[in-house]
Image (tube, rainbow, N blue to C red):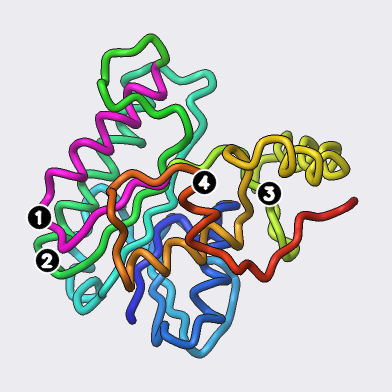
Amino acid sequence: MNVLLFGATGMVGQGVLRECLIDADVERVLTVGRSGTGQHHPKLRELVPPDLMDLSAVERELEGFDACFFCLGVSAAGLSEERYSRVTHDLTLAVAQTLVRLNPGMAFVYVSGMGTDSSERGRTMWARVKGRTENALLRLPFRAAYMFRPGFIIPLHGIRSRTAWYRIFYAVATPLYPMLAARFPRAVTTTERLGRAMLVVARRGYPKPVLETQDINSLSRPARDAFPTG
């Protein structure tokens, strides 16, 4: 399987990249983003296009892929709906529309979030925008499209958020992870389980297009990871 990965430098993307590189069924991975990952691996190539909204200059590099894992995203904090929509909806759809033309047999996996509003009419801005994005992706003629809605994601294997306050939060919250996982199994997952589940649906499919945390965890079992104890 040949995989395109958008957003490989973020916390989720780092976890997905790790799982792709150690999966024997993945032959090559092309990361696409605003910067390189700094990693070196025989399977890995990196592409840093001048404008992610317009991939026309690099289209030939994007052909021949079986799956796209789209992990790009920004926090809605401090952003207007217009600005948040441009990154979350407009950029995602610009990429997806290019890819479905180049790779109609591709499986497209989009990382959304728990609480996304499929009705597009709720009060919470980010949830409306995510819902609009999901709905638009599901209308595109990919072989398959899956919307992943993880809740609280535990970073494993030395993976760290690029956002300073997230790093502080995770450092402080680490001792609570086992308790959270035990008490809220439908809301807590890990970067490893998320990446493993993406690979599973890209290869085998899934009965429904929207996957919540419990679906993600179920798909990735038996998991190699264990929730940290501190």
Taking the image as shown, residue 103 lies to the left or right of residue 22, namely: left
Give residue 192's position: percent from left, percent from top: 60, 62
Label number found at residue 214: 4
Front one among 78 and 210: 210
Between tags 2 and 4, which lies in front? Answer: 4
Q: Amino acid at mark 4?
A: Gln
Q: Amino acid at mark 1?
A: Pro
Between tags 1 and 4, which lies in front? Answer: 4
Q: How many marks?
A: 4
Check disc 4 and report its element: helix, strand or loop.
helix
Check disc 1 and report its element: helix, strand or loop.
loop
Task: Please name the residue that numbered disc 3 is placed on.
Answer: 154
Q: Which residues are magenta?
A: 125-148
Task: Please name the residue that numbered disc 2 is placed on.
Answer: 104
Indicate whether residue 141 is drawn in magenta: yes
Image quarter of residue 41: bottom right
Between tags 3 and 4, which lies in front? Answer: 4
Eyeballing the image, is 80 above or below 209? above
CA distance for labels 1 and 3? 33 Å
Residue at 51 percent across and 43 percent down: it is 150
Taking the image as shown, residue 164 lies to the left or right of residue 187, namely: right
Question: Reading the chain from its start, which is encountered first: label 2 or label 1?
Answer: 2
Check disc 3 and report its element: helix, strand or loop.
strand
Dot 2 alpha-carbon crowd within 10 angstroms: few under 14, some 14 to 19, many 20 or more: some
Question: Reading the chain from its start, which is encountered first: label 1 or label 3?
Answer: 1
Location of the N terminus (image quadrant): bottom left
Residue at 60 percent across and 56 percent down: it is 191
Give residue 31's position: percent from left, percent from top: 42, 68
CA distance for labels 2 and 3? 33 Å
Dot 3 alpha-carbon crowd within 10 angstroms: few under 14, some 14 to 19, many 20 or more: many
Looking at the image, the residue that sits furthest to the top is: 123
